[in-house]
Amino acid sequence: MPRKPVAEASAPTATVHGLTLVRGQGGELHQLAEGDTDVLTTAQGGPVSDDQNTLKVGARGPTLIEDSHFREKIFHFDHERIPERVVHARGYGAHGFFETYESFAKYTRADIFQRAGEKTPAFVRFSTVAGSKGSFDLARDVRGFAVKLYTKEGNWDIVGNNIPVFFIQDAIKFPDVIHSVKPEPDRDFPQAQSAHDTFWDFISLTPESMHMIMWVMSDRAIPRSFRFMQGFGVHTFRLVNAADESTFVKFIWKPKLGMQSVVWNEAVKINGADPDFHRRDLWNAIQSGDFPEWELCLQLFDQEFADNFDFDILDSTKIIPEEILPPIPVGRLVLDRMPDNFFAETEQVAFMTQNVPPGIDFSNDPLLQGRNFSYLDTQLKRLGSPNFTHLPINAPKCPFHHFQQDGHMAMRNPVGRANYQPNSFGVGARESPERGFRSFADGEEGQKLRLRPESFADHYSQAAQFFNSQTPPEQRHIAQALTFELSKVETPAIRERMIAHLLNIDEGLAVTVADKLGITDMPKPADAAVSPRRDLEPSPALSIIANGPESFAGRKVGVLIGNGTDAGLVKALQAAIENEGAAMEVIAAKVGGALVSDGTKIVAKHMIDGGPSVLFDAVAILLTEESANLLAGEAAARDFVADAFSHCKFIGFTPGAVPLLSKAGVEPGADEGMLPLADKASATDFIESCRGLRLWARESAVKL
Ligand code: HDE
């Protein structure tokens, strides 16, 4: 293939560590000397004459060890992998910015909160926890929500999750909970799943995990997309102002598009149809200019509130309900750019809880204190050098000056004679008691003890509160999730121990799960450190369904067409979808598309088995009777309809589509989620109905 001259290369140049890099034909960045043409070189810069054949003795002889181009190429390839993260290995990141609404100087001297309208560059990485780097996106799991804010006074990492509580109260238990959920060590399965003996063994022996278990068995653990998740800093932190006054704070990210989850049967199928479902969603949204946005909200409280609150604010297995302490919005986070290179940015980004700028500080939460040790340590293992801060994704974007030097892959080295301070050569920077980070001077005294505080002992009250705050469909999903997970547990004693815990949370839930598992002799409730548990007021803010979005924006409709489909109706539907800020994808029997009523061809994005309805939030079936009859003979088409129906999706359909609906076992008049489509008005009505996201009333009919 003739090479394109450099001048024609579509993408811009980039400067990395002072080198000008040019994007090549394959989109790769590489170094060019001035006046050079686009010739392939070795990593040492030597031009390469032949990249297709190794150097051999004769055409059929042995390969020569002097083929240094081959050796360099293979050597580098052999070393391409770095250790994946021990947890949160599978992740996906994007760049963006944080915009401060108003000055918050009253509470914090953090530079990022001083000026209204201040924009701070940000990088966010979402992740699952248990699976390896190549696992699927829709595991039932916690999602990481790690935010790096490149502030003018250093990087601030809020390394959070999409669930506001955690499994354990003390960091010393972290290796145990993670070992238990990872593949079992003798057999190395199951991958990216909590549904196995070792996980439930550990959990059933760890009552402090019960609140988290309610969250992890809820719809929160199978989000529709990263864009529809909340994020939480989890621990109590501190804001510290210029007068060194401290206010306790909890961080919450709220998605502008509202929350949404899928159902488990759908999650299982999505993992087969598109294991990259969440990645693709974020990629598509950002590439199409539909930038996801979250609001940062703060729950602020003082020592007096902490002393009077029902639970210990240092206990990461507890929340402070929003109804008791309303979150205050302080700014917005917008993701508007995908990384140029996944490895350089998303894989190498190093988040660390201990990265806080002046004005933000820690609490004594024993989980947070342990994390502050772990994250630095793990980066050295993963990135292989203490110079991981030299990587562009990890380097601060503000001026920085220190005397750290040398080590593997040192990119920035001190200049001048003195590499220490104080020095009398006038070299380098000095510390600043005024500008620098000052820890909040909290008074601490006590004996050295390995002891869990009494105030951490109530493990069931908030678990019950979470369950009681869910809508009936969400409660059903929790029961189904527990049943599914425990049905995969082979040791009966573990199942029974779990039922004993559930009895302390909600008797109805315990009985439902036990019944489904075939447990006839109900165990006694588990011994509880605090008994009886408290009956807390439900917190409606904890439900996803009760707090659904007002619009269908950001969602996707799958439109099934065939030969003869009404072209005007496709256009009307597309207009209604786009007007709502949603997207449409066309599915047809052939990916080449279908000849529609006006004689034009509409190209399809998917063939039916490549675009099953689980990939969409709602579906429209725009078929003539002839096409519907043809498709009724295809399993993929019948599944398309049957799945959309049993996942409680809104289904728009033309009268011609009825033979396919019937063959799929779906009655056209089954319920108000089945919407006939004929014209512009009905297309608009259909999209308005879709705002409800799912018709949960159908659930009892389909027995999800
Ligand atoms: Fe992490 N966690 N964690 N974690 N965590 C890591 O750091 C750790 C915890 C969270 O996208 C590791 O860079 C300990 C809670 C996220 O790169 C490691 C404890 C929360 C990410 C680590 C916890 C989190 C990590 C592995 C118990 C929510 C992914 C790779 C005290 C508030 C960040 C790495 C990314 C990653 C340790 C518990 C969130 C080993 C010891 C609680 C989002 O350092």
Image: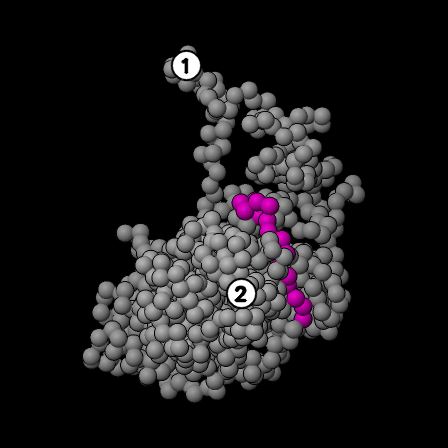
Q: Earlier in the sequence, mark 2 or mark 1?
A: 1
Residue at 63%, 28% in the rendered image:
38
- Tag 1 residue: 59
- Tell me if residue 571 comes above or below residue 603 in the rendering: below
How packed is label 2: few (under 14 Cα within 10 Å), some, or many (20 or more)?
some
Instruction: Give me the disc on residue 569.
Output: 2
Q: Position of residue 516 (x, y in %)?
A: 26, 75
Quadrant of res 236: bottom right
Q: Nearer the viewer, residue 558 or 428?
A: 558
Q: Is residue 439 left or right of residue 258?
A: right
Find out whether residue 688 is within the magenta segment: no
**Horizontal and vertical percent position of residue 302:** 62, 79
Q: Is residue 17 visible?
A: no
Q: Is residue 329 left or right of residue 700?
A: right
Task: Name the residue: 75% across, 48% down.
Answer: 429
Residue type, mark 1 in image: Ala
**In the image, what residue type sits under mark 2?**
Leu
Magenta span: 330-345
* On-image quarter of the N terminus: top right
Question: Who's the residue at 45% across and 68% down the image?
Answer: 654
The x and y percentages for residue 658 are 38, 69
Tell me the SS state at disc 1.
loop
Q: Is residue 583 above or below residue 469?
A: above
Name the outermost residue toward the left: 520
* Relative horizontal placement of residue 98, taking residue 271 as reference (left or right): right
